[in-house]
Amino acid sequence: GVCGNTCDFRAADTQNFTALLAEFRSQLNALGATTHKTYQLSIASSASPDTFAKLELAKIPAYLDHINVMSYDLHGAFESQTNFNAPLMPSAADPAHAKHLTQSEAMQGYIKGSVPAAKLVMGTPF
């Protein structure tokens, strides 16, 4: 079965978020030593460069099995112009081109921030 817990990250609490992940990992490893099971720890994280830049990207992969990048809903009814919900690649024709809101740019942002590509899961709408 799957057991989960949800915590909401607040940008003002960056170091404590990293510390929380470290503590979760420590406790899961200790539990695994007694149950002889492996427990995974992952987070769902933003595709917005303004948001993920506030994470300690060089530190958190040590505690996580995966980072699920929510690379969808990049555009929507909350904007004045119609656009793709989850553009895969950048396009000069994109009215929001300067915001760097594409799936590929989000994934590259995490990789440039020292997150191993093997730990990234790209969320995509269907």
Image (cartoon, grey):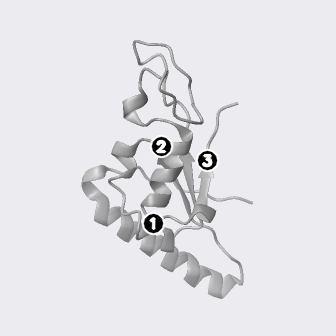
Q: Tell me the kind of residue under disc 3.
A: Met
Please name which of the two marks, 1 or 3, marks the residue nearer to the observer.
1
120 lies above or below 18 = above
Measured as percent of width and height from the top left, residue 17 is found at: 36, 62
Q: If the image is split into quadrants, where does the C terminus sit?
A: top right
Total number of numbered discs in the rendering: 3
Measured as percent of width and height from the top left, residue 12 is found at: 24, 53
Determine whether the residue tagged by mark 3 lies in a helix, strand or loop: strand
Determine whether the residue tagged by mark 1 lies in a helix, strand or loop: loop
Q: Which mark is residue 47?
A: 2
C-alpha span from label 2 to label 1: 15 Å
For the residue pair 85 and 34, the one nearer the viewer reads as 85
Mark positioned earlier in the residue sequence (2 or 1) = 2
Q: Which mark is residue 114?
A: 1
The local crowd at label 3, few if under 14, some if 14 to 19, many if 20 or more residues have their Cα within 10 Å, is some
* Residue identified by numbered label 3: 122
Measured as percent of width and height from the top left, residue 57 is found at: 41, 63
Determine whether the residue tagged by mark 2 lies in a helix, strand or loop: loop
For the residue pair 102 and 32, the one nearer the viewer reads as 102
102 lies above or below 116 = above
Residue shown at the point (50%, 13%) measured from the top left: 82
